[in-house]
Amino acid sequence: MSFWYRSSGIPEPGPRLDGDLRADVVIVGAGLTGLWTAYYLKKARPALDVVVLEQEFAGFGASGRNGGWLTGALAGSHGRYAKTHGEDAARALQREMYATIDEVIAVCAKEDVDAGIVKGGELTVARTSAQAGRLRELVADARATGLREEDLRVVDPADHLRVAGAVGAVWTPHCARIQPAKLVRGLARVVRDLGVRVFERTPVTSILPHRAITPYGTAEAQHVIRATEGFTSQLKGLRRQWLPMNSSMIVTEPLPAAFWDTVGWQGAELLGDLAHYYIYAQRTEDDRIAFGGRGRPYLYGSRVDARGNTHDWTVEALWQLLIDFFPAAASSKVAHAWSGVLGVPRDWCSTVHLDRDTGLGWAGGYTGHGVTTTNLAGRTLRDLILGADTELTALPWVGRKVRAWEPEPLRWAGVHSMYRLYRMADQRERSMTRTSALARLADLITGH
């Protein structure tokens, strides 16, 4: 289980489904997508009968295991959304992502959800000449797509925090630190208080038009919403829909004030880098570093390690990276490690969809950017379910059609080749001034 649950407590699952039922809306999955959708539906139409079905407990999956980034970053590229819907639509999606950060903060304040939220921005560092080149490209692309200096600007990394070997950095205010388990558990409490029926320990084995099938009964509704993200591959007929990708994290012991003074990490900035095998980090509420990256990225046949076991070599690799970033942390040690699974579509772009004929809808494929995107998805699904024509339903990720991933063994070979090439590219770029051709080959293989 994640450090977030170890520190806040693992919840006791609620009652399971006991027999068939009918409702207006049935949501499969009690992570952030499902809970935000339930929240906004009940707020808009209190009389709606909304049911959520969850195979473990609310927040069991990625919603309670992620890196704690409430970020405005999009899953996929601006260019891919612009290609299908135009520049204006792609810019509108980015602006909605930025606004969604403040929406989450506002709802947490209104509903008394203490998720440890601090909007401290995000620092992305370059630690090689090749990464510095990608940093310049990132800024140029941001300006070309309408992002202003106030949205993303070049900074001296030492003005924010001192990362060993950093040669450049950009900073954006559009990111907040959260404690993920507190957010999802607080939201689960809120939706229950609104009258949403949440059935835990109730795995859904199949989703059909207007029906969700479980071992304990069938839930029927006008609309059935799939909110299963990385666990989607476990549903009948959806093994190739989204790739279940693993991401791993470690967290240090609490670090003394002298450490934070040494590295200059005095605020709640989130930290990332421009390596291909990239990292993500936060300073936790209790003065630890939570540090994440890719471990064992994919299991053959789209299998899912639901318990989040983390291999020793992954823990050691993340620890070595952490002390490479912050040598002053070497006197500490790893206090906890865990893994989670995220959903990756074939084009690496998120999707929201509702089929009015079958009543089936879904949202997901967040590729690791889900904490913010789930809220936008919940509000968008609300509008689609209620039949409202709004600015949200016009966004370019709505109704996006994506082809399935290749059959095995191509899927396994492609993903593992991608990450091997990325690791090799990062090694080579230590002595290069430009992005390695190996990384470009990895991008070509997987369409990343």
Image (spheres, helix red, strand yellow):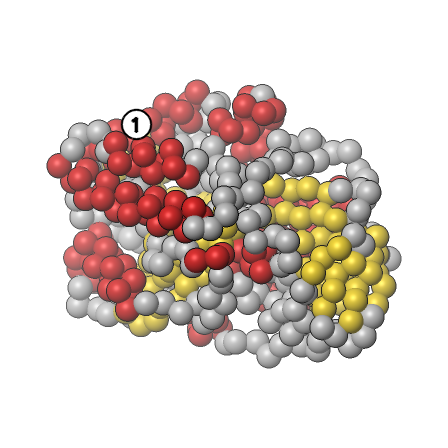
User: Is 168 left, or right, of 215 in this rendering?
Assistant: left
Q: Give the residue displayed 32% in from the left and 67% down from the top.
A: 311
Q: Position of residue 207 (x, y in %)?
A: 71, 57
Q: Secondary structure at mark 1?
A: helix
Figure quadrant of the C terminus: top left
Question: As rendered, which of 101 and 213 lies closer to the eye?
Answer: 213
Q: Position of residue 363 (x, y in %)?
A: 63, 47
Q: Which residue is mark 1?
A: 136
Q: Residues within 10 Å of mark 1 (few under 14, many from 20)?
A: some
Picture layout, residue 277 above or below residue 129: below
Question: As rendered, which of 86 and 193 lies closer to the eye?
Answer: 86
Q: Give the residue displayed 50% in from the left and 67% down from the top.
A: 306
Is there any visible trace of residue 413 in the rendered image? yes
Q: Give the residue displayed 32% in from the left and 34% down from the top.
A: 441
Question: As rendered, which of 23 and 190 lies closer to the eye?
Answer: 23
Q: Quadrant of residue 255?
A: bottom left
Picture layout, residue 365 above or below residue 86: below
User: Is 149 left, or right, of 432 in this rendering?
Assistant: right
Q: Give the residue displayed 38% in from the left and 55% down from the top.
A: 297
Q: Quadrant of residue 148?
A: top left
User: Residue furthest toward the left?
Assistant: 431
User: Could you tell me the amino acid type at mark 1?
Assistant: Arg
Figure quadrant of the N terminus: bottom left
* Number of numbered discs on residues: 1
Question: As rendered, which of 62 and 110 lies closer to the eye?
Answer: 62
Q: Position of residue 259 (x, y in %)?
A: 22, 61
Q: Position of residue 175 (x, y in %)?
A: 45, 45
Is there any visible trace of residue 182 in the rendered image? no
